[in-house]
Each structure stands twice: as C-alpha cells, then as structure tokens.
Image (spheres, helix red, strand yellow):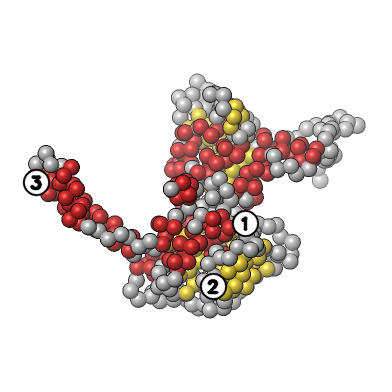
Amino acid sequence: ESSVADAVKRGVPTAKALARPPPPLDEAAVADALRSQLAEWPEEIVAETVDDVLAGLRQKRAQLAGARRVFDAVDGGSEQLDVAALERLGVLEALRAYLADKDRPFLGICLGLQLLFASSAESPGVRGIAAVDGSVAKLAPPEGCAVPHMGWNEALSTKASPLFLPRARYYFVHSFALERCDPAWAAACTDYGGQRFVCAVADGRRAACQFHPEKSGPPGLDLLRRFVALASAAVAPQPLGAPDAGTTTLARRVIAALDVRTNDAGDLVVTKGDGYDVRESAGEKAVRNLGKPVDLCARYYDEGADEICVLNICAFKGEAAGDLPLLGVLRRASERCFVPLTIGGGVRDYVAADGSRVSALDVADAYFRAGADKVGVGSDAVAAALAYYASGPTGATSIERIAAQYGRQAVVVSLDPRRVWLAADGAPPELGGGTPLPKVAVHATARG
C-alpha cells in the first residue's frame, strides 16, 4: 500500500491503473448494497438512485476498457524521474503489459518516448520496455550548442502519418535523445546544433514524441486531438501529408512577463512601476492595477505568447510556499495556458511564522505542483554565485538543489541590472571570495 501511495503522490501512474483491465461489474450486488443503505428512503427515489449509479458505473467501465494512454513523465516529485525510477515504481512492468497488445492506443511524451527503447544513457544498466529497437544517448551537438535542447523547434515527418504533420513547431526540453531507431518506427526528426535525431515514433495506434505537445500551444493541442481521434477510430485516419526533406532550427520566442503583487485591498494584481515604484503618482497613490493575473496570462496566450513568466515582486516579504492566492493563480493559469509557465519570487530558504524551516527546494516544489514548468531565482542567485566562486560546486545552493531535483532546464535566474558610476580614476568594488571584478566601461562623452 505504501508504494502505491507514494506513486500516486508523485503523480506517477500505478501498475494497477495502467495494466489491469476494469473489473467486472456486479450490478445486482451494487443494487442490493444501495437498497440496503437507502432502506428508509421513498421507493421511487431509491429506484432512481440505483438506476443513476449503475448507469454511471457502466459508463466508467466502458471508458476504462477503451482507455487511451498518454504517458508524460517529467517530474517525479521527491525524486527526479528517469527509467530507473519508473522501474522501481513498477511502471515499466505495467507498461510492458499494456503495450503487449499492439492495437492498444499509447502516446508517450519526452521520457515516455525514451522508455520505449531497451537502453538509455540516462539510466545505465536499466532495461527499458524494448518495444522499439534502438537506444538513447546524451545530446552532443557538434556545433557546441547548450544542452539541454530547450525551446521551440520543428519536427519534420519522415513517413506519412495521421498524427504528425509534414512540418510543425513544438516545444522541446531534453538532454537525451534517440541515437538509433528502427526505421519502420521513425516518424519525425529534428535538427539541433548540427545533430539530427528522431523526435517522434509511430506504429499503428502506438506513438511517442520527444517534444511536449501539452506545452506547444494550438499545434500541440491539435496533435493531442488527432491522437484521441486515432485511438477512437475503427479505421485509421488518412495520413496528413508527404514527408518533409528540409532542416529545422530553433525559433525566436515571445515571452510575456507579468509583475504580480497584492494591492492595498489584498488582491493579486498585475502591476508595473517606475523603477521599483508601482504606485500611482496622483490621488490615493494606489498600487497600479493593470489587470488580473489569470486573465492577462490567458490573453497573452491567446495572442500568441510562446512562454509566460509570472514574477511575484513582493514574495521576499512573505512565505512563498504558503502563498495560497499565488499558487491558486498558478494553477488556474496552467489550466488555461498551454505553453511553458515560469514563476519567480521568494525562491529562498526562510523560517516560517510557525518556526519551521522552509527551503528554496520546498518553495520550488510548491510552485511545480501548482503547474509551473520553471522557477525563477532572484536574490538567492546572488548568494549561490558568491558561494560558487568561494568554494566551487557544493550541491548546497538553491540553484544546485533545484537543478538536481528537477533538471537544470527547470531553473531560471532573474537578474536586475544596475549601472554604477565611478570616478574617473575609481576602481570597481571588490566582492571578495574569488568573485570576478565587475566589467568597467568608459562612458562616451560625445555621440557620433
């Protein structure tokens, strides 16, 4: 029971949920149990209740029997998810049983793609499902691009498919990719830094992709709708077009950034200030109110923003992990906006009002569970940098702890640049501890 409970807490499908067929429905036993509990109720209400409950159970069982499996494995909660973690949780065994029937619908996303293969460099010595011949290795782009590969890139179809368009742009975030794949399964490919890799596979109603359709806006949602249609169809839909023989590249992004804080009435609002002054200059000098956070997130998403960043500019004053209004905003925004969502503010160690110690990782946990894809570290990033220059990597700073738990792609550093004027012969301030001196630029006295 404890292992199943832990799996549920981590948001991981349990073996029971994935592999077991829905149990038989003993309608007579259900009806007798209901009648026993409702013995003193009017008979017409009892009969109506029994009919309603049985109808609901029949519908649920039918849904379970024809379930379409979408497996998106990114965050494991208290442990970073990889193939080894899924093996410990019993998920791989359940998926092997589920995929043994080649006609059962399945869509794997990100790690859900990689676990279909026998081996992965991310989990050496752990055997994957081995449903597809091939292997997974760490990205090594010859042009020296950063790893992870993160951003909006294109997927080019390599075979006609009812799922994957000839060319479409999706959101990628990964450090490992397929280095070898059965050509019969390969469905789409992507280029990054001079390295081409298979980014999607498909065979009948089974498919998987390295990118995240659930974070790719309308194109990703359309792909998910096509999968539901494919999983439900008695006859496979027609392919979407001929393969594309071009190349792909990362796109420039439009990121909408919202500064959020409470106004004098205690309501969360989006604001903007002159420097750090967010109050109106006239009247009652109220906090400048540009709108409600969820409404503006939805508006920016609808207008085409590729990513949304919400920064709680007053989080340093309170307890970020217990900020229920902000966490509620984050949950509602993540239900409305299907692009990456970053939340910043208050990601630091602090002591709560009840005397308990709250770590930066605890704050990040709360943000991730509320729907964030990345967390922004502000003031604590300065402390992390000073500690790095003083002692090198220790694994103890907030950035290192969050990156170790959720992956380096999950941490964003938020910087407020400031210009400091020096005398003509002045030297920049020394920060000590091996920290590099700030760069000094000579200001031009004339233009032209």
Helix, strand or loop status at disc 3: helix
Residue 2 in sight from this viewpoint: yes
Measure the alpha-carbon separation of dots 2 and 1.
Answer: 25 Å
Disc with the residue nearer the chain's start (1 vs 3): 3
- The residue indicated by pointer 2 is 132
| Residue at position x 83%, y 35% in the image | 433
> Which residue is at the far front?
1
The percent coordinates of residue 402 (x first, y second) are: 63, 44
Out of 197 and 104, give the one closest to the viewer.
Answer: 104
Residue 220 in sight from this viewpoint: no
- Residue neighbourhood size for the residue with mark 1, other residues' Cα within 10 Å, grouped as few (<14), some (14–19), many (≥20): some
Q: Quadrant of residue 211?
A: bottom right
Label placed on residue 44: 3
Measure the alpha-carbon separation of dots 1 and 3.
Answer: 60 Å
Out of 340 and 428, give the one closest to the viewer.
Answer: 340
Disc with the residue nearer the chain's start (2 vs 1): 2
The percent coordinates of residue 447 (x first, y second) are: 81, 42
